[in-house]
Image (cartoon, helix red, strand yellow):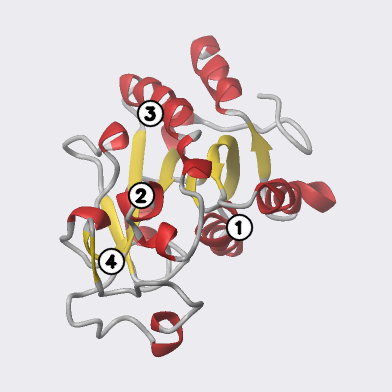
Amino acid sequence: MEARPAPFTFDPISTALLVIDMQRDFLLPGGFGETLGNDVSQLRRTIAPLAALLAAWRAAGLTVIHTREGHLPDLSDCPPAKLARGAPSMRIGDEGPLGRILIRGEYGHDIVDELAPVPGEPVVDKPGKGAFYATELGELLDERKVVSLLVAGVTTEVCVHTTVREANDRGYECLVLADCVGSYFPEFQRVGLEMIAAQGGIFGWVADSTNVLRALREEP
């Protein structure tokens, strides 16, 4: 299929759609993203195209894996440097409108309704920005014989970028879906995508989800 910096070739059977951190705490008013002073509406444009891709990917019987960033209720897996970052009005673990911020099991920690996992889709809970750090993601991909990743989620320059870099170091071929990843900062979105495909695809490929949908329709 067409992509930047060159066509991306993948076998759907050995490819997983990795949906990163599409959580209420990041996308909804009152969540952690907003406490950091961000405009959460910047992320919501990703929901519709990602929902369409999820529907097609699921209809084809292909692998979907979700991630959620968050911490244990006692914060024992949250390093002090992360807990104290920035100058938000509320911090990780504080009680907010959506429950305790970025705490596993709270309402805000879970995935937005429009993209909720269906039975059988793994959900990887991660304490860091990268989806491989201190998680079972590598084992899940190995079990399913996955060699390529279609990457969606938020935010482009933080958890998406960190995960793609981790995956690249582990030998996975990654396609980042430009319309299904989002940043609170338009300039970070633009530059983050350019960095993925720079130097002949130093970290991977970039394309819109419509290209994937087209490729799926053309699959014999």
Q: Is residue 164 above or below residue 127?
A: above
Measure how far apart labels 2 and 1 are at the Cα level: 21 Å
Q: Nearer the viewer, mark 3 or mark 1?
A: 1
Q: Amino acid at mark 3?
A: Leu
Q: Which residue is mark 1?
A: 157
Real-space Cα separation, disc 2 to disc 3, in angstroms: 24 Å
Label 2 element class: loop
Residue depth check, mark 2 versus mark 4: number of the one nearer the observer:
2
Residue lying at 43% horizontally and 80% vertically, measured from the top left: 82
Residue wearing tag 4? 101
Image point (32%, 19%), residue name: 59
- Residue 113 coordinates in the image, percent (x, y): 25, 36
Dot placed on the residue nearer the N-terminal end, 2 or 4: 2
Labelled pair 4, 1 in contact (Cβ < 8 Å): no
N-terminal of the two: label 4 or label 1? Answer: 4
Q: Is residue 184 left or right of residue 80?
A: right
Q: Pointer 3 and pointer 1: residues touching (CB < 8 Å)?
A: no
**Nearer the camera: disc 4 or disc 1:** 4
Residue 5, position in %: x, y? 78, 38
Label for residue 54?
3
Quadrant in which the N terminus appears: top right
Q: Residue furthest right?
A: 199
Which residue matches tag 2?
29
